[in-house]
Amino acid sequence: MTELQDLVHRAQSEFAAISNSAELENAKARYLGKTGAITALMKELAQLPPEIRRERGAIINQAKQGIELALQQRRDALDEAELQARLAAQAIDVTLPGRGQRGAGLHPVTRSWMRIESIFNSIGFDVADGPEIEDDWSNFTALNSPQNHPARSMQDTFYVDVQDGRGQPLLLRTHTSPMQVRYARAHVQRHAGMTEMPDIKVIAPGRTYRVDSDATHSPMFHQFEGLWIGKNVSLADLKGVYTGFLQTFFERDDMTLRFRPSYFPFTEPSAEIDMMFDSGPLKGRWLEISGAGQVHPHVVRNFGLDPEQYIGFAFGSGIERLTMLRYGIADLRLFYAGDLRFLEQFNPA
């Protein structure tokens, strides 16, 4: 009995003298660990007769509980001391003069968005805005991606538990192309009966959503898409418009563009647009910057136009990607972390 009491008192004294949590856990192991004093005593019970084992086991268990209680009390005391020290270090001096309100600034993506609108406004493009929760027809079917079309799997998205007038679930739009559909149909209705309909020239910037997330993708991202439909619009116009846009956006002419054959259901032929800077850190590296192509006849027809008379091109680019290239940002997730140290770089005092 005296042996176990001494063990408990020794543990209590040792715990009381410890000043940090790491040392306390080491001391715990000496008493309650796999090779600790209490564990060793418990192992010895197997060699005792049953009647003695029961009595001895109860005494050892009582000692164990005493050590555990002392351990928990010391843990609580150390936690309280650590909290008080932290509070003292972070104390607020209420006698200090108040700080002035900090000035606000624009997010880098917003800066790029405004810049894009300004550039395209200067060459005669309208800017269209529309709903972020779209119906299936506008987001997919009108753009030549009917039900069960394999191209839909390229744009896995978030669906809403509400159905549209055609019995299909609403969804968070996967691109801003639905606004091209809405704008074009409204344009055609507005100019119905005219001898010569003005060309459709529009960009549609906005938030879009896809089930994707890594250093270069986000479930929510910003995109702008452009559309130019008329009777004499060609892919040569696409090259001229997009080349001029990039040169103005990046404020440099030392770049090379290439159009690489690709596939999109809403354009035919389709292309990926790659860009390469002729100088700087990204010199000599091809960068995918946009998808584009001649608007598919089915889509032109869904605009309410005759594809035998009207032709044009469409393109789409990620605003975050353009922003990352303009400012040299390596990780897209920085845009949404809310870290003022990052954001303040774009809004110097």
Image (tube, rainbow, N blue to C red):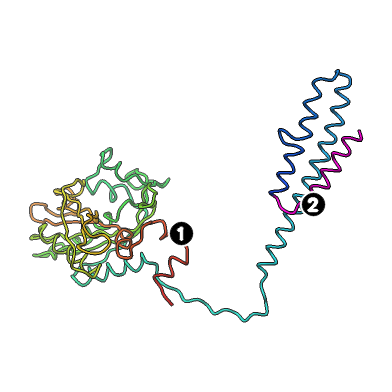
Q: Which is nearer the eye, 181 or 241?
A: 241
Is 300 placed left or right of 216 in the picture? left
Residue 337, disc: 1
Residue 17, disc: 2
User: What's the residue type where badge 1 is placed?
Assistant: Ala
User: How crowded is the residue under tag 2: few (<14 C-alpha within 10 Å), some, or many (20+)?
Assistant: few
Q: Gap in Å between the C-alphas at discs 1 and 2?
A: 44 Å
Q: Which is nearer the eye, 310 or 305?
A: 310
Q: Image height check: is 234 above or below 118? A: above
Q: Examine the residues drawn in magenta and state their main secondary structure.
A: helix
Image location of residue 154, percent across then percent down: 29, 44
User: What's the residue type where badge 2 is placed?
Assistant: Ala
Is 325 placed left or right of 241 in the picture? right
Q: Is residue 149 a member of the stretch shown in magenta?
A: no
Q: Which is nearer the eye, 323 or 167?
A: 323
Q: Image height check: is 327 above or below 312? A: below
Most extreme residue toward the bottom is: 97
| Rendered-image quadrant of the N terminus | top right
- Badge 2 marks a residue whose secondary structure is helix
Is 194 placed left or right of 247 in the picture? left
Write down the region rendered in magenta.
1-21
Most extreme residue toward the top is: 49
